[in-house]
Image (spheres, grey):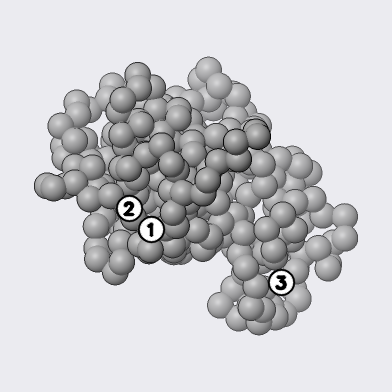
């Protein structure tokens, strides 16, 4: 299945997507919750598998496919080639940081540059959506806790990120986590080993910037889930973004950063493509 949320911002509805169109799940199940913690806890992922309605072609906005996750956990330096380009040592265990839910953005909505950064960068990443609550999960059982997979652009304000001793601020500006276009269940990808051989790319204004493969991951999805859940309870709807391959802007010579008018397309085979226009910073409301 390919789970989506569609409609105007703030009024998205849960649906299923295919090449033939959209199935409006709210029209079939009026009581269905938005795609988030309750959706997964109440086993709606299984319930909607029975849907046989014919998809309808719709010209609608696709929103972020996930509503209000409790946390977005990200990995740093989890691709060997990315570690080499940044001259980082290989981490002995998954290197974790967070992005806050306010950063979530639709798969085709604009990335808004913050007024406090002049060095905004891209990072295509395979993101895992958790479907069951768990702590102390063994890696052999990790996929029992996964709802599906999606594409995330871990947009990063590099000057802010590297001027502070932690990455929280530079990773969590509004719109800095475009996600989508859908939450794709494992059966759409194939067997687990195919997940370990997916091509990831980023194009900026049509120019190929990142071209990597999940086979280059230092820690695979099962190992990541085991490590995180050792001390942190994962709840349904949580996002784990598994790191980025080589080719980010900060480590180019000379460095390349995003500017208003740029277009960033992040793609993962078998999962999909997100494409976001970059827009200028908005004035801050002085009364707030």
Gap between marks 1 and 3, in whole Å?
35 Å
Crowding at mark 3 (Cα within 10 Å: few <14, some 14-19, many 20+): many
Q: Is residue 69 left or right of residue 213?
A: right
Split into 4 quadrants, where in the image is the N terminus?
bottom right
Look at mark 1 in the image and give the residue it sits on.
260
Residue at 71% in and 71% down: 23
Q: Residue furthest front?
A: 286
User: Where residue 29 appears, x then y in whole percent?
Assistant: 85, 61
**Front position in the image: 131 or 180:** 180
Query: Looking at the image, is 161 positioned above or below residue 127?
Result: above
Give coordinates of residue 256: x percent, y percent: 22, 50
Q: Closer to the observer: label 1 or label 2?
A: 1
| Tag of residue 258 | 2
- Marks 2 and 3 sit apart, C-alpha to C-alpha, by 35 Å
What element does badge 2 sit on?
loop
Mark 2 or 3, closer to the camera = 2
Q: Residue at x 31, y 42 (%)?
A: 119
Would residue 268 be visible to someone looking at this image? no
Which quadrant: the C terminus?
top right
Q: Which mark is residue 46?
A: none
Q: Is residue 53 left or right of residue 203?
A: right
Q: Position of residue 280 (x, y in %)?
A: 44, 54
Can you see residue 173?
yes
Q: Nearer the viewer, mark 1 or mark 3?
A: 1
What label sits on residue 23 in the rendered view? Answer: 3
Using a 10 Å C-alpha cutoff, classify the residue at mark 2 as few (fewer than 14 neighbours), some (14 to 19) or many (20 or more): many
Give the side of residue 178 with respect to residue 50, left or right. left
Rendered image quadrant of residue 268:
bottom left
Query: Which residue appears at 53% of the width and 17% of the height?
Result: 231
């Amino acid at each position: 299945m390919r789970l989506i949320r569609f409609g105007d911002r703030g009024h998205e509805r849960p649906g299923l997507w295919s090449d033939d169109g959209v199935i409006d799940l709210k029209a079939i199940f009026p009581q269905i919750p938005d795609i988030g913690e309750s959706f997964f806890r109440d086993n709606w992922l299984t319930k909607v598998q029975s849907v046989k309605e014919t998809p309808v072609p719709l010209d609608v906005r696709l929103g972020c496919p996930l509503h209000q996750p409790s946390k977005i956990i990200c990995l740093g330096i989890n691709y060997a080639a990315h570690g080499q380009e940044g001259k980082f040592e290989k981490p002995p265990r998954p290197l974790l940081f967070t992005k806050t839910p306010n950063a979530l953005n639709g798969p085709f909505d604009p990335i808004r540059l913050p007024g406090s950064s002049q060095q905004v960068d891209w990072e295509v990443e395979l993101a895992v959506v958790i479907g069951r609550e768990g702590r102390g999960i063994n890696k052999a059982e990790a996929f029992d806790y996964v709802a599906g997979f999606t594409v995330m652009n871990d947009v990063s304000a590099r000057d802010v990120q590297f001027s502070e001793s932690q990455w929280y601020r530079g990773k969590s500006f509004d719109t800095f986590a475009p996600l989508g276009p859908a939450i794709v269940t494992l059966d759409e990808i194939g067997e687990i080993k195919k997940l370990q051989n997916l091509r990831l790319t980023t194009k900026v204004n049509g120019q190929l910037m990142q071209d990597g493969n999940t086979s280059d991951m230092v820690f695979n999805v099962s190992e990541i889930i085991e490590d995180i859940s050792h001390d942190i309870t994962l709840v349904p709807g949580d996002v784990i973004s598994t790191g980025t391959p080589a080719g980010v802007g900060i480590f180019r010579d000379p460095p390349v950063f995003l500017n208003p008018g740029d277009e960033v397309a992040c793609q993962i085979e078998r999962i999909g493509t997100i494409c976001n226009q970059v827009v200028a910073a908005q004035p801050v409301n002085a009364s707030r």
